[in-house]
Amino acid sequence: MMASSYVDFFKDKRGKVVSCIVNTYTNSGVTRSVTIELGRKYVIDPINLLKKKHRGRTCMVIGFITDEQGTPSDVRVKFLDTSRTGRISIRDIVPVDVAKNRSDRFFNP
């Protein structure tokens, strides 16, 4: 499954990225729009079903990792179950309430 993303980001006075909006589009018509902010909790839920690493884990965003052009491509997260840090693709996280609603629909028809 191919997916493309559009990232719009916001910086503070010092030039540090503090939040971004990620719009992800797939060939099957699935679209996802996520606002990512520092300090908020998210669940790792990749669109690609073959991506198994960290799926379903809850984390807190502690920073953004930018590419050569200065656009955020990954997020630095702290996993809430182990308190370890990791690097996750910016397309693979969703807010906790959205992930909870998805699991409710999946398990409670």
Image (cartoon, helix red, strand yellow):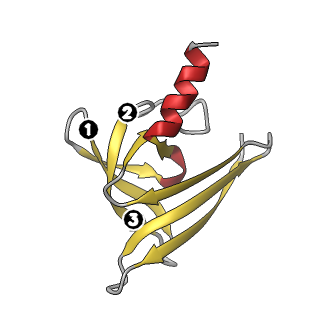
In the picture as drawn, the residue positioned furthest to the right comes out as 28
What type is the residue that disc 3 sits on? Ile
Counting from the top left corner in percent of width and height, residue 72 is at: 47, 67
The label shown at residue 65 is: 3
Residue 17 relative to residue 71: left or right: left
Q: Of label 1 and label 2, which has the lower sequence position?
A: 2
Q: Quadrant of residue 63?
A: bottom left
Instruction: Describe the element under mark 2 as helix, strand or loop.
Output: loop
Counting from the top left corner in percent of width and height, residue 102 is at: 57, 29
**Circle 2 is placed at which residue position?**
57
Q: Quadrant of residue 15?
A: bottom left
Q: CA distance from mark 3 to mark 2?
A: 20 Å
What residue sits 61% from the left and 36% below the top?
48
What type is the residue that disc 2 sits on? Arg
Q: CA distance from mark 1 to mark 3?
A: 20 Å
**Circle 1 is placed at which residue position?**
80
